Image (spheres, grey):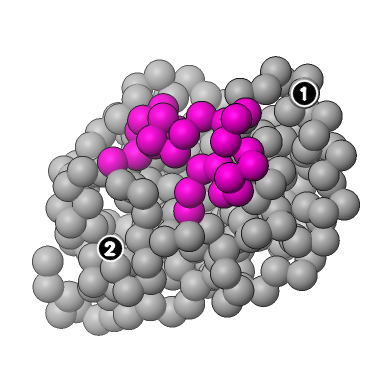
Amino acid sequence: MYKDKLNHFLSKNPFSRPLTQGFFYREKMRAIHRIAPEVNFREILEVGGGQSGLTALLYPQAKITNLDLNSEYSQALCNQQERVRFVCGDATALPFNDNSFDAVTMFDVLEHIAQHEKAVSEVRRILRPDGFLLVSTPNENWRFPYYGFMKPICPSDTDVMAEWGHVRRGYTLEELKDLINLPCLGHATFINSLTVVGHDFAFSKLSPLQREFFCTALSPLTWLGYYLHKPEAMGTETASAWQKVGQSVQN
């Protein structure tokens, strides 16, 4: 089976309060869906999938292997599905044979890996010929908070990066091309200058009730920015698709 239908996929947003504080995740899911190929994948490796189960939602009939450093995620409901296998492991030393998977997903993962070149090299190794790599990362426009007027109620971007375990801010598309060293099939940005306000309120220092109030109040602006956003428009994060063409990719 190919990728899930967009509306059904979006309806499965695993983030809490998906239409207010978790709306940014809907934006991410739409961008990923836009670049995900219509391919009948049999086996997909999700690197750093944690407890979201996003790849399993995107390709609902594929067999998913979710690799993550945190062994506690093995107990997450998404990893209890019959077609999902959880493996505790390191992205820079994937415990799989060469040419093992039809596709690999790395959603908001690369910016967490100090040795990102080694991780990508491992991905190329375990991808089958003509296999796909799907990636999402912050890009050169990411900062927190995005607007200066939010600084009094938000942690600094340095604090946010430390809390989220980021070792780098993000990547331009050209930097991703140099790092991944595979043909890029397409990209789509998300979280733009309108929707980012709700995103930053969702991760502000306000109380949960206050965050919910402001995200709800901002919903008309957020939905407007969401509907107007085009894949090539400026955003603070980027989803992209890459393909290992043939047999001769060099690690």
Foreground residue among 86 and 157:
157
Q: Residue at x 57, y 63 (%)?
A: 235
Q: Of discs 2 and 1, which sits in the foreground?
A: 1
Q: Position of residue 51 (x, y in %)?
A: 51, 31
Which residue corresponds to mark 1?
A: 210
Magenta-highlighted residues: 142-167
Is 52 positioned to the left or the right of 199 in the image? left
Foreground residue among 76 and 221:
221
Q: Position of residue 59 (x, y in %)?
A: 57, 56
Q: Residue at x 12, y 73 (%)?
A: 250
Pointer 2 with pointer 1, Cβ within 8 A: no
**Residue 23 makes an appearance in the image:** yes
Circle 1 residues within 10 Å: few <14, some 14–19, many ≥20: some
Q: Mark 1 belongs to which amino acid?
A: Gln
Which residue corresponds to mark 2?
A: 127
**Residue 25 makes an appearance in the image:** no
Is 249 positioned to the left or the right of 200 in the image? left
Q: Position of residue 202 (x, y in %)?
A: 66, 34
Q: Secondary structure beneath disc 2? A: strand
Q: Mark 2 belongs to which amino acid?
A: Leu
Q: Residue at x 68, y 36 (%)?
A: 201
Circle 2 residues within 10 Å: few <14, some 14–19, many ≥20: many
Vertical order, 142 against 232 (above or below): above
Image quarter of residue 129 = bottom left
**Quadrant of the image for the C terminus?**
bottom left
